[in-house]
Structures are given as structure tokens and as C-alpha cells.
Amino acid sequence: MDPRSITDALVRRMRAISGKTEEELQVLRGLPITVKAFRPDQAVVREGDRPTECCLIAAGFCLRSKTTSSGQQQILSIHIPGEIPDLQSLYLQVMDHDLVALTNCTLGLISHAVVRQLFRRQPEIAEMFWRDTLIDAAMFREWLVNIGQRPAPSRLAHILAELRDRLRVVGLADGDSFEMPLTQERIGEAMGVTAIHANRVIKQLRADKIVDVHRGQVTILDEAKFQELADFDARYLHQSPTL
DNA sequence: TCATTAACTGAGG
DNA sequence: CCTCAGTTAATGA
């Protein structure tokens, strides 16, 4: 991958959530970054690791997950290009969950020392990432409400609606179709149901002509019904700094 | 390997 | 009695 394009999605996202200009964000493009490729299912960092760098997703999808002592896996979040899913390792030394590549991924590794120095020299950049971290927390609150309180079909629709919104910011979703490279096993782990029940829910939404999820591709079949089912209000993503 | 479906079961409203 | 969801098992792509 062209070294310049490693930070494209990041800059795009930061422009959306911080309102800063391309010029103000130029500093991000100049950071020393090591590019590394990951295979599907390859762990980026595991629970218990002590990372010395943060990883920026330049291409591909990752997810955060935790496994219980009995081996049950819970997916905590899905991550897309432009995001830095282990930014917290900058200040929390030991990883408390796993970060795994979902697809072939191109990650940009940025050393903690470099980021800390950047934050000290340019506090407005640090504030921007502080804001980004708070949005991350808001997404977890929404995820919790989703799994704890919504019926299964709404749960799936909500996950899809949020992902679509985030993909749009980095230009990876435009029409009524977008990528979500999760097997039904993983969709179940994200929803907190078995893979078989996830399959039943998908089947139902397909039969009702609301949304189709097939081979890692999501297609919205009825926007109005989808919106209603998803109970999705984009406010918690805080993608527009002026509101 | 992943997706799909049926049949059965139980919880809970 | 109905809906939701887990288990088991069989089968299709």
C-alpha cells in the first residue's frame, strides 16, 4: 500500500468527528508508521499483552472480543479503516481484551512514544483523540443497550445501521449495500445469541424483505422498515462536532 | 467450512 | 397458547 494512503481513512474520519481541516490534520500524515499485513483470524494484540505501539486500520476489518473461562466468546466491537482500536493501550499498559483481524488487513503501527510526544506538542490533536475515545465509550454504551434490551431482529439491524453509518464517513458505504465480513457464528457472538438463532433472524429479515446479509455483504431492501427496526439514532456517534 | 432447515425443548408472557 | 431462543441433527452450497 502507498505509504501516503495509510492515513487517508484516519484523516477522513478525524475531519468528520473533529471538524478540523485537512491542513490541521497534516501532522497525522507525517507520523512514522510501520505497515504490517494481517491474515484473517490473526490476533493483532491479545488480552494480557503489553503493546508498545498503537495500530491504525488502513484497510480491512478487525474486531475486539473477550472469551469467558468456559470458552464463550463475546464480540465487543467491529472496527473499520480509519479507526485506532487499541488507542487505549497508550495509557492502559495491559490489554484487557483481544484485537483480531477479521479479513486481510493493512495496519499502520505507530509507537506509543511518538504519539505521546505528538500529544504533548499539539494539545489540540490530543483533545481530538480524547474526543475520539469518548465516542468509542459511547459506542460501547449503545452496544450494551442493544444486547441487553433489544429483541434479536432489532439487535442485528442496529449493529448493521451503526456499521453503515461509520463506513459512510470513510467512503466505504454509499448505496444500499456494504461489507460486513462476519460469519453467522460471529454475528451470533456479536448479538449474544447462538449462530443458529442468528441464522433464523437473518432468514426472517430476508423473508420480510427488510435486509439481506449474505457472504459478508449487507443489502438494505427496505430502508424505512430497516430504520424502524434498528431503532438507530446516530447521535451517540457524535460524527458532527458542531451539533 | 459455512449456511440452512427441521424437530424438539423449555422459559416466560 | 404464542414467541423467543437453545440443542441436536441432518443436509446443502
Image: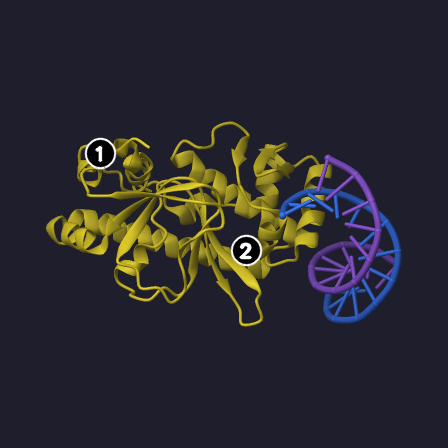
Chain colours: A yellow, B blue, C purple
A33 or A97: which is nearer to us?
Answer: A33
Quadrant for the N terminus of chain A, please.
top left
The reply, left or right, for residue A140 in relation to residue A181 is left
Q: Measuring 22% from the left and 55% from the top, which residue is drawn there? A: A112
The reply, left or right, for residue A200 in relation to residue A3 is right
Give me the disc on residue A146: 2
For residue A16, say whether it is visible: yes
Where does residue A12 sit, x and y in percent of width and height? Answer: 31, 35
Q: Residues within 10 Å of mark 2 (few under 14, many from 20)?
A: many
- SS category of the residue bearing label 2: helix
Where does residue A28 sit, x and y in percent of width and height? Answer: 21, 40
Where does residue A87 sit, x and y in percent of width and height? Answer: 31, 54
Q: Quadrant of residue A215?
A: top right
Q: Chain of mark 2?
A: A
A166 or A229: which is nearer to us?
Answer: A166
Figure check: A190 above or below A222: below
Amino acid type of the residue tagged 1 in the rendering: Thr
Figure check: A18 above or below A97: above
Amino acid type of the residue tagged 2 in the rendering: Asn
The total number of labels drawn is 2
Q: Going from the N terminus, do you reach mark 1 or mark 2 first?
A: 1
Q: Residues within 10 Å of mark 1 (few under 14, many from 20)?
A: few
Quadrant for the C terminus of chain A, please.
top left
Q: CA distance from mark 1 to mark 2?
A: 34 Å
Figure check: C9 above or below A12: below
The residue where tag 1 is placed is: A21
Q: Measuring 65% from the left and 49% from the top, which residue is drawn there? A: A153
- SS category of the residue bearing label 1: loop
Q: Measuring 17% from the left and 39% from the top, which residue is drawn there? A: A27
Q: Chain of mark 1?
A: A
